[in-house]
């Protein structure tokens, strides 16, 4: 397989003031499943297309296994790309769709047959080899598109939002299928998506992008439990993190915060981090799943009024009005009997909460040795 290295890569377009990709550096390890995640226009697809050779690189260096690829044409990069659209030839059978690229490369017929049969067996397409695309389901067509990449046995697989055209149930199934294929092939895969569920469930690491820049890179649960700023905290997670304004009244050894209309202690933050906060203004963040209906250590009680109730089967989402008037979301169990208009007491897990600097949105650093959210066993 291959190691893909991006060093200070930028991409600018004529007539556009801001670069589409702005000085990013990233190393994708051999056999890694790396997910590029971000909202529309963040530069993730442009980055993928530069790796594929479909976009020129304005500045910086792209290497595969230490070989610089900036001027190497797409066809010579030994890369296979799976697009959002299946891009299958409608007049050809599955077998011929799989064989087409190999024939153009002059691969021996016996070798083509061997590769096709192996890929078909791996992807569960053997019984569909003589069918044409119109006789296949969306998931089967996507597997054919993946099979066309697999038979090439490339160094790197690139995926540009390949599941966007599938319905919800099929997305879940195909998502699992791709993870399974990655384990079987041990291949280097780079996957672009705006769907944070896909990123959390598929990637070995997630690279979160915004406005052409890399914001944070790490294992899915690492970036989920330890966001570097409010953008990551809000973007990664559904429902998103509750973020409200607050006031610091802390001193050495900890912080006392007033937010949501209540005051509470926030341990684990260094004095240096707190001193850096201007005027004591902070943003307080807490994820919906860290708000409970039951008390426990490290949780602070708060009286709220239920605004809306969204029963989702496995869980229930509550929109709550805090004493300050701020509305926050809580993810609770499906057994709740709360109804709109009721007053209820909820409990905030402060050990899982965050403090952010208002101007930059950057997370305040916890004191060295303080427990990080991802280091604790969840109740």
Image (cartoon, rainbow, N blue to C red):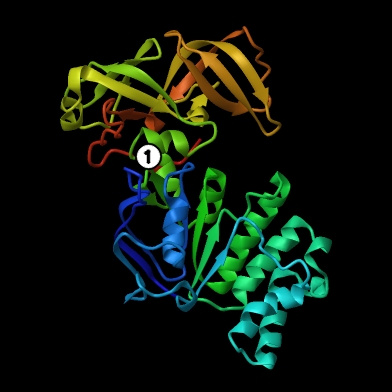
Task: Classify residue 309 as left or right of residue 287.
Answer: right
> What residue is at 59 percent from the left and 26 percent from the top?
332
Closer to the camera in the image, 108 or 91: 91
Query: Looking at the picture, does residue 285 appear above or below residue 82?
Result: above
Q: How many marks?
A: 1
Please provide percent x and percent y for residue 303. Answer: 49, 10
Q: Is residue 305 left or right of residue 169?
A: left
Residue carrying label 1: 227
| Frontmost residue, 206 versus 100 | 100
**What percent of the width, then of the height, locates residue 377?**
45, 41
Give the residue displayed 83% in from the left and 75% down from the top. Answer: 130
Image side of residue 344 versus residue 53, left or right: right
Answer few, some or many: residues within 10 Å of disc 1's Cα (few below 14, many 20 plus, some between 14 and 19).
many
Q: Quadrant of residue 300?
A: top left
Against 147, residue 379 (above or below) is: above
Quadrant of res 62: bottom left
Residue 45 placed where, x, y %?
A: 47, 53
Please name the residue shown 40% across and 14% down the image. 260
Q: Residue at x 64, y 72 (%)?
A: 148
Q: Position of residue 144 (x, y in %)?
A: 70, 67
Q: Is residue 267 above or below residue 367?
A: above
Q: Secondary structure at mark 1?
A: loop
Q: Closest to the observer: 374 or 190?
A: 190
Q: Is residue 136 above or below residue 206?
A: below
């Amino acid at each position: 397989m291959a190691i893909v290295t991006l060093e200070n890569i930028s991409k600018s377009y004529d007539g556009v003031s801001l670069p589409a990709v702005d000085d990013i550096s990233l190393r994708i390890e051999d056999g890694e499943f790396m997910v590029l995640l971000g909202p529309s226009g963040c530069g993730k697809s442009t980055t993928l297309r530069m790796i594929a050779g479909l976009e020129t690189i304005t500045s910086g260096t792209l290497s595969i296994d230490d070989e610089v690829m900036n001027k190497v044409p797409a066809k010579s990069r030994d890369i296979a790309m799976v697009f959002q659209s299946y891009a299958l030839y409608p007049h050809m059978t599955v077998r011929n769709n799989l064989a087409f690229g190999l024939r153009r490369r002059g691969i021996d017929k016996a070798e083509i047959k061997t590769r096709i049969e192996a890929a078909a067996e791996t992807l569960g397409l053997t019984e569909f080899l003589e069918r044409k695309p119109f006789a296949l389901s969306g998931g089967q067509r996507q597997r054919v598109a993946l099979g066309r990449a697999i038979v090439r046995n490339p160094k790197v697989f690139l995926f540009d939002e390949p599941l966007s055209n599938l319905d919800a149930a099929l997305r879940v199934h195909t998502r699992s299928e791709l993870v399974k294929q990655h384990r079987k092939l041990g291949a280097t895969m780079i996957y672009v998506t705006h769907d944070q569920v896909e990123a959390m469930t598929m990637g070995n690491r997630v690279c979160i992008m915004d406005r052409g820049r890399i914001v944070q890179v790490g294992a899915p649960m690492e970036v989920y439990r330890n966001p570097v700023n409010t953008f990551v905290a809000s973007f990664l997670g559904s429902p998103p993190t509750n973020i409200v304004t607050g006031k610091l009244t802390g001193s050495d050894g900890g912080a006392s915060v007033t937010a949501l209309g209540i005051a509470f202690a926030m341990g684990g933050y260094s004095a240096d981090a707190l001193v850096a906060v201007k005027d004591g203004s902070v943003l307080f963040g807490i994820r919906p799943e860290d708000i409970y209906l039951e008390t426990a250590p490290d949780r602070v009680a708060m009286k709220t009024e239920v605004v809306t109730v969204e029963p989702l089967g496995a869980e229930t989402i509550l929109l709550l009005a805090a004493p300050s008037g701020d509305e926050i979301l809580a993810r609770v169990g499906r057994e709740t009997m709360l109804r709109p208009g009721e007053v209820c007491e909820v409990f905030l897990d402060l050990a899982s909460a965050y403090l952010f600097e208002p101007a930059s949105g950057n997370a305040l650093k916890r004191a060295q040795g303080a427990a990080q959210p991802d280091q604790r066993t969840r109740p």
